[in-house]
Image (tube, grey):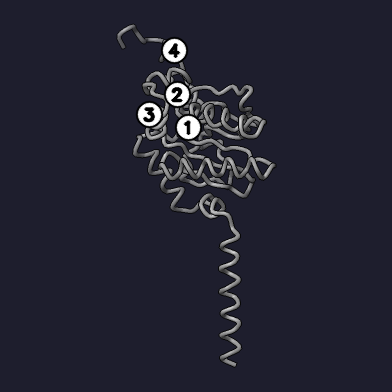
Amino acid sequence: MKTALRRVSWTLTALLAVWMMAVPASAQTLRGSRASVDRQNREARQHDFTFLRRSSQLDRFVDEGLLVPLEGGEDYRLHDVSFNVARPEVKLFIERLSAQYLSACGEPLVVTSLTRPTAFQPANASAKSVHPTGMAVDLRVPRRSSCRRWIESTFLSLERKRLLDATLERWPLHFHVAVFPDEYLAYVSRLTGRSTSSLLNSVSGPAQHTVRRSETLWG
């Protein structure tokens, strides 16, 4: 009896080892966890980002240039995005990723969500979600396996450099990506030889401010 049980145990162990070898590394790394959510939330708080509650706050952040609009184009398009604004660094990330994705796969990247105030978060959203800060983007999962492998490999590479945290969400199916703004901006600056201010201006333009009643040129 004991010998039979040992044989069953060995068989199960061998099957488990084979299954682990068959599961792609990306599926293990991008599966998400509580630690992943905590890491994203901690990054947002270290940057002292505001967790926007209402759309009126979002409008004010756009006025102040803290959030910038994304319009889509040849490289990427927006699908059912409630608020088409994000941190400038996130826009820079999307523009760079989508250009590379179009070159690799011949199709535009699809953005399904950007900044979401807490009042507009879906029922299944984590209380620690960083979408209300503008530092996250949701992307449609490519249908073609080759394109999915390309984008997952790219996420893994950027994760290893500690530039972002990416998760393959199952319900609904999409990639959730939290971009670490300072780290990503510095990385692109080193890569391109451009200053961080030049890179930010390329996605947001010179800082602008809408003058409100009672404001003056000096305050």
Quarter of the N terminus within the rendering = bottom right
Q: Is residue 74 above or below residue 45?
A: above
Image x and y of residue 146, in percent: 65, 43
* Sequence order check, earlier mark of 4 and 1: 1
From the viewer's perspective, is the residue at label 1 or at label 2 nearer? 1
**Callout 1–callout 2 Cβ contact below 8 Å:** yes
Classify 10 Å Cα crowding around label 1: few (below 14), some (14-19), many (20 and above).
Answer: many
Classify 10 Å Cα crowding around label 4: few (below 14), some (14-19), many (20 and above).
Answer: few
* Sequence order check, earlier mark of 2 and 4: 2
Decide if residue 75 is on the left or right side of residue 211: right
Q: Is residue 47 above or below residue 126?
A: above
The residue under label 3 is 190
The residue under label 4 is 210
- Numbered tag placed on residue 134 in the rendering: 1
The residue under label 2 is 61
Image x and y of residue 196, in percent: 37, 23
From the viewer's perspective, is the residue at label 4 or at label 1 nearer? 1
User: Type of residue at label 2?
Assistant: Phe
